[in-house]
Amino acid sequence: LPAIAINFPKFVDGRGYSYARILRDRLNFEGEIRAIGDILHDQLFYLKRCGFDAYAVREDKDIEVAQEGLSDFTESYQAASFMNQPLFRRRG
């Protein structure tokens, strides 16, 4: 499949994060993984770390403000789907 959309029916439903990690890390899915549904600015950074590379932000939210969520943090301690090593392994 060229793309898979994972629905977040509510802000508090975190199953989509796990689905994306399984697709990327276990199944080696290389296509687009799109987050749809109740997607907010606060989630974008974490969605990216789990393997999402496309986002359909709620219609009542400003897309430019939401985009800022992708760079809320400059460094992460944990490994991610695109970064296999935690911070302490990446530092010298």
Image (spheres, rainbow, N blue to C red):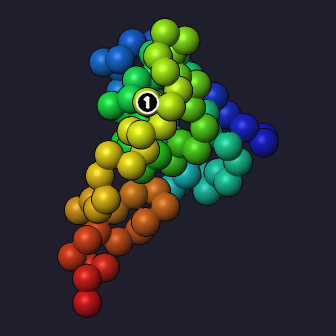
15 left or right of 90 in image? right
| Residue 92: quadrant of the picture | bottom left
Q: Residues within 10 Å of mark 1 (few under 14, many from 20)?
A: few
User: Residue drawn 53% across and 26% down?
Assistant: 63
12 left or right of 56 in image? left
On screen, residue 72 above or below 79:
above
Q: Which residue is mark 1?
A: 65
Asked if residue 17 can be seen in this view, the reply is no
User: Residue drawn 25% across and 82% down?
Assistant: 91
Pick the front one: 74 or 27: 74
Query: Residue 79: x and y, percent?
Result: 34, 62
Pick the front one: 53 or 23: 53
Q: Tell me the kind of residue under disc 1.
A: Val
Asked if residue 36 can be seen in this view, the reply is yes
Pick the front one: 49 or 58: 58
User: Residue drawn 39% across and 57% down?
Assistant: 80
Number of numbered tags placed on the structure image: 1
User: Residue drawn 41% across and 40% down?
Assistant: 68
Query: Residue 13: x and y, percent?
Result: 35, 20
Query: Residue 83: x and y, percent?
Result: 43, 66
Query: Residue 8: x and y, percent?
Result: 47, 19
On screen, residue 58 above or below 69:
above
47 left or right of 53 in image? left
| Residue 44: quadrant of the picture | top left
